[in-house]
Image: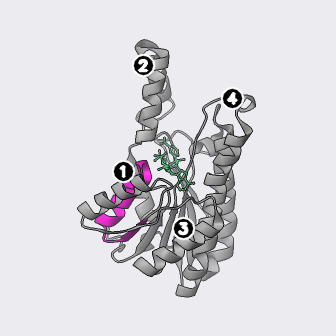
Amino acid sequence: MDLDLKGKTVLITGSGSGMGQHMAVGYAQEGAKVAVNDINGDAVAETIKMVEAAGGTAHDATADITDLATVKDMIAGTESALGGIDILVNNAALLTEHTMFLETDPDACMREIAVILHGTMHCSRAVLPGMIERGGGKIVNIATDAARVGQEREANYSAAKGGVIAFTKSLAKEVGRHNVNVNVVSPGATNSPMRIGLQQQLRQKLGDEAWKAREAKVLRLYPLRRIGEMKDITNTVLFMTSDAARHITGQVLSVNGGFAMA
Ligand SMILES: NC(=O)c1ccc[n+]([C@@H]2O[C@H](COP(=O)([O-])OP(=O)(O)OC[C@H]3O[C@@H](n4cnc5c(N)ncnc54)[C@H](O)[C@@H]3O)[C@@H](O)[C@H]2O)c1
């Protein structure tokens, strides 16, 4: 299937690492122009090199998405460099603590909500007027199955992502008339460098035997008996932001090996 993404301008938040970086290369391989946003400028530079190595065009959109004025400047800079944004992928996130809710730090909680929920809302607010004026666009918000079914030790993160899901549905109802599709892609556990790093820490903490037993238990929660890979998410996001998915809006699509079916 030709996704017809050639020449489109896409902005991916948090694309200095992990899945966002993987998506940036995926879009470049499809011929799209990529605005690489992250709070970490060195990470943005790394992704830009990868996009260019894949034969693509990239723009440095380094910014902290928790600040609306900064986001507006970042979007204006992107549009003057690459042209109007056709596709926005709200991917940036922060999971600062893996601990029971009552033991979490309220300031860290506010920061997670600021990046995940407010960041998504700021970028959508800044990008939508241009999309509407140009006759349409696509927004995909990356959530998590933790928000769909709940996840112990991730209450703050899940709450923020649950907000993203509710925001997506309401916004989809408002902007559908302007030919803007807004959807959620909801990964289950996925082997990004972030997850692999957390697993390494856990392995050190628990010891080899206990960690292997835990991994086997985790895999039994996944009917397909595997953890997702970054390409599983990238493929889905590319499809959801293509015109092949033009009649899909306000939906939450889990990419999770069957972990949650709610
Ligand atoms: N890896 C998993 O198992 C998994 C599972 C479910 C959902 N997700 C979601 O997938 C997405 C990608 O996850 P990942 O594993 O690649 O994580 P990651 O930590 O590698 O990527 C997140 C990026 O967001 C950036 N970021 C943080 N705060 C920012 C800010 N204020 N402004 C701009 N950028 C900021 C970070 O610097 C980082 O590069 C996230 O939305 C995450 O919640 C991941």
Res 114 seen here? yes
Going 42% across and 27% down the picture, which residue do you hit? Answer: 200
Q: Quadrant of residue 32 in the image?
A: bottom left
Q: Where is residue 76 in the image (x, y as percent from the top left)?
A: 53, 77
Task: Give the SS element for disc 4.
Answer: loop
Give amino acid for label 2: Lys
Q: Quadrant of residue 225?
A: top left
Residue marked by disc 4: 100
User: Could you tell me which quadrant the N terminus lies in?
Assistant: bottom left
First along the sequence among labels 1 and 2: 2
Badge 4 residue CB within 8 Å of ligand 1: no
Q: Is residue 17 magenta?
A: yes
Looking at marks 2 and 3 on the same chain, the residue that comes earlier in the sequence is marked by: 3
Q: What residue type is labelled 3?
A: Ile
CA gap between label 1 and label 2 equals 25 Å
Q: What element carries label 3?
A: strand
Give the label, 2 or 4, closer to the camera. 4
- Badge 4 crowding class, 10 Å Cα cut-off, few under 14, some 14 to 19, many 20 or more, is few
- What secondary structure do most residues of the magenta stretch adopt? helix
Answer with mark 4 or mark 3, whichever residue precedes in sequence.
Answer: 4
Q: Mark 4 and mark 3 in contact? Answer it, CB < 8 Å.
A: no
Q: Where is residue 11 in the image (x, y as percent from the top left)?
A: 47, 67
Say which amino acid is labelled 1. Lys
Residue type at tag 4: Met
Residue under circle 2?
A: 212
Dot placed on the residue nearer the N-terminal end, 2 or 4: 4
Q: Which mark is residue 231?
A: 1
The residue sitting at the front extreme is: 42
- The percent position of residue 246, horizontal first and vertical second, equals 49, 73
